[in-house]
Image (spheres, rainbow, N blue to C red):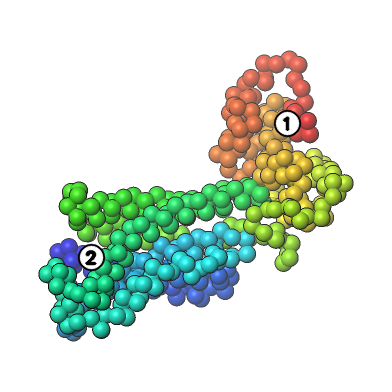
Amino acid sequence: MEEILDELIAVATLGIALFGIVFSLMQQQFQKVYRSFALFLAAVAVNNFPTAMLRIAEAAQIPQTHLVIGVISIFGALCIAPTFWVYVYTLTSVAQKRPPRLYLHFILPAFALLAAMALPFLPADLRSGLQLEKYIAAVGWPMAYIVLLGILEIALYIQLGVYIILVIRRLLRYRRRLKDVYASTEKRELNWIFVIGLLAMIFWVVQILGLLAAFGIEQTLISSVIFSWAGFAIFLASMIWGLRQRPGLLPSAPQGQQPEQESLKYEKSALTADASARIERKLRAAMKLDQLHHNPNLSLWDLARHVGASPNYISQTLNEVIGENFFDFVNGYRIADAMHKLVHTDDTVLAITYDVGFNARSSFYTAFRKVTGQTPSAYRKEMSGRADLDDTKEMQRDT
């Protein structure tokens, strides 16, 4: 029964993955991102193809069916984590760039591919099943082949743990990068990948327990069907969100006006102190006089166009002269505006949230508490009892 369920899950996964590959390759926008996602889906398809075709292979009496399936499955499984990493890296880069030294991520899959290509050259008695007594009797390169398969099987568990860490680190860096170029980041934070990472981590822990049970170190009551369903759930969530996802660091400016590097470094910048001071005055005027912070979708590129300076010079001035990233700079003016409205108007907190430029109540509360240490309602209540109110709109900025 378990074999039938495993086969059904594999068939469903294979069909969904093939659909996703075709859909991704048909997209005209963000082609590098969609092609990276198609590569990940192809790895999933390869991993599930042998199990999905098991019954057909047995009916056709293909020799060494289970051995072939095992080796191909290892190859596909070793490709899943690196290809998902390539997708996440491409999705979170400014110019949709792929990771440097890409070939290093596919060394393990290359060994698995070599193992698959070597199958026809194994001695006939080993190809018939690779039972334990065959392991002991094997000598020479067949023994090396068996050892290689064992190493790849164990490496699969290590690889998954390493790539979970890499993806989470990349997403944390991406979140920091978002705050350099956007005043509102809620819709771009890729929280779904964090969820996928958490599920993958749980799945990894359970697999480790299963591996320990296989060696008799630990007992497990988890069947292969639960493994299959867990993997299918993680894949399905990745599929649904991946096909809908757009790059988060996509410039809203014309070609050529985006930052030159993902990590802002200014060692070779030609920006002088006088020019920085002029840009700072323009930035503050854009907030105080033109009230650009009321735009909930304000980006670094929008602000750069408004003040007539390059995005890199804006970032350098914010970080080195003002001492804030773009996100904190803009939201500082939003909070100062909100503080003024809370004291001097009867507008609801929700109305003030949208009036000052926030596009979500949760982000407004988080930012307000970070600046004042209070909720907006508590701040309004406290300030309403003061007779000598200062102009709160000027309290938080330009001091």
Label 1 sits on residue: 396
Taking 281 as reference, is 37 above or below it? below
Residue drawn at (81%, 44%), measured in percent from left and top? 280
At which x and y percent is residue 282? 83, 46
Find the distance from the CA under tag 1 to the CA under tag 2: 60 Å
What's under tag 1, amino acid-wise? Gln
Q: Which mark is residue 352?
A: none
The mark that comes first in sequence, 1 or 2, is 2
Q: Which mark is residue 6?
A: 2
Task: Count numbered badges in the picture.
Answer: 2
- For label 1, count other residues whose C-alpha is less than 10 Å away and answer few (under 14), some (14-19) or many (20+): some
At which x and y percent is residue 171? 52, 52
Residue drawn at (53%, 73%), measured in percent from left and top? 27
> Would residue 202 appear left or right of 291 to someone viewing this image?
left
Taking 190 as reference, is 42 above or below it? below
SS state under label 2: helix
- For label 2, count other residues whose C-alpha is less than 10 Å away and answer few (under 14), some (14-19) or many (20+): some
What's under tag 2, amino acid-wise? Asp
Residue drawn at (82%, 52%), measured in percent from left and top? 271
Task: Evaluate whether residue 33 shows in this view.
Answer: no
Residue drawn at (74%, 62%), measured in percent from left and top? 257
At which x and y percent is residue 229? 28, 58
* Image quadrant assignment for residue 252: bottom right
